[in-house]
Image (cartoon, rainbow, N blue to C red):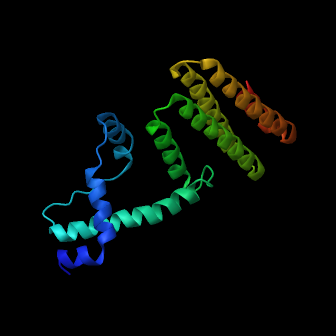
Amino acid sequence: MNTRNFEKDYPDIITGLEKLRRVRVSDGFVNRIKKVLIPQLQVASVQNVWPLFSFRLATSVLLFVMLMGTGVVYAAERSHPGEILYPVKKAVGSIKINLTQNPAKKIQLRLNNADQKIDELENAIDKGHSGEVQKITSSYEQEVKRATSEVKNIGGNKEDEVRKVEKRLDEQTQKLEDLQKAVPTNFVPDIKKAIE
């Protein structure tokens, strides 16, 4: 198959790639990608590859990543500590936060992560994984600290955002207090620490 036939057979791919080629991104975005995403990927060097083969490879990889990547990310969202996809879940969460420029949205993402930690905590307690409970409560505390420290980065009217954060933290504290009442006594100190 030569390049001309490919262009005739797959005009939508060619059009999409041409649009991607014209996209201009800011230096700040490029630097964030380099700082966050590149270290998490293993990059293989491909040299002296036939141009059409590299185009096919790039198209195939792009399609594979789009189709499979979304499935893996979707599956990872439901993973828990100790499971195979849990590192993917953590990496995706970290990437989302690091690529978010709006401080209010960063706070909400961090509070969402804290909610996930509470769900993970319930799961670990149900399964009797006492070693995981301490790690999860520690991660919860870190997310809450980071969320509350992000408030200072908000410009303008901070009071509204502070109220939203306080409301979410109150809800999370209530969940933790309810959980504390229902768990075996060996888990209570870790949950108390998270509540404080």
The answer to which image quadrant residue 10 occupies is bottom left
Q: Which residue corresponds to the image point at 68% horizontal and 28% vertical from the top-left?
A: 164
Q: 114 or 130, which is in the foreground?
A: 114
Q: Which residue corresponds to the image point at 29% horizontal and 71% vertical from the top-left?
A: 11
Q: Position of residue 127 (x, y in %)?
A: 74, 52
| Residue 111 located left or right of residue 96 | right
**Vertical placement of 81 versus 140: above or below?**
below
Q: Which residue corresponds to the image point at 67% horizontal and 35% vertical from the top-left?
A: 137
Q: Quadrant of the C terminus?
A: top right
**Vertical placement of 178 versus 73: above or below?**
above
Q: 160 or 35, which is in the foreground?
A: 160
Q: Quadrant of the N terminus?
A: bottom left
Q: 72 or 164, which is in the foreground?
A: 164
| Residue 102 located left or right of residue 193 | left
The answer to which image quadrant residue 106 occupies is top right
Taking the image as drawn, is residue 106 in sight?
A: yes
| Residue 46 located left or right of residue 83 | left
User: Among all residues in the image, which is located at the extreme right?
Assistant: 181
